Image: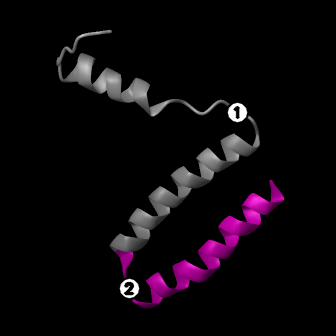
Amino acid sequence: MIFLLLIYALIIIIIVPGLIKRNEWRELAVFSILYIIAFVLGLMYVLDIPIPSPMHGLQRLIVDVLGIKYPMQ
């Protein structure tokens, strides 16, 4: 777990100052959102917490929200 934290901290130390220096606020916002998602998923994996399948969310979106039916096999 310490290794995961060190790697993520190193990436932040390398990338974020350049984004701030160049005033790339939108890129920093997108980077932060994706980075937090990746960190949470990595932390869940390291702590042996079951990671939810994205297919369940896609199936709910397609069938329940959009109302598109597809044949089940």
Left or right of 33? Residue 45 is right
In which image quadrant can residue 70 be found?
top left
* Pointer 1 local density, CA inside 10 Å: few below 14, some 14–19, many at least 20: few
Image location of residue 41, percent across then percent down: 60, 45
Residue 19 included in the magenta stretch of the image = yes
State the predominant SS element of the stretch in magenta: helix
- Give the amino acid at mark 2: Asn
Tell me the magenta residue range: 1-25
6 to 47, vertically: above or below: below
Query: What's the residue at 30%, 9% (across, down)?
Result: 72
Query: For this view, does 2 lie left or right of residue 54?
Result: right
Q: Earlier in the sequence, mark 1 or mark 2?
A: 2
Residue in front for this viewpoint, 59 or 32 = 59
Q: Nearer the viewer, mark 1 or mark 2?
A: 1
Q: Residue at x 69, y 47 (%)?
A: 43
| Secondary structure type for disc 1 | loop
> Pointer 2: residues within 10 angstroms few (<14), some, or many (20+)?
few
- Extreme residue toward the right, this view: 2
Give the residue displayed 69% in from the left and 42% down from the top. 45
Q: Which mark is residue 23?
A: 2
**Residue 43 colored magenta?**
no
- Give the residue number, with chain letter if any, for mark 1: 49
Horizontal and vertical percent for residue 65?
Answer: 23, 22
Image quarter of residue 25: bottom left
Gap in Å between the C-alphas at discs 1 and 2? 37 Å
Q: Quadrant of residue 60?
A: top left
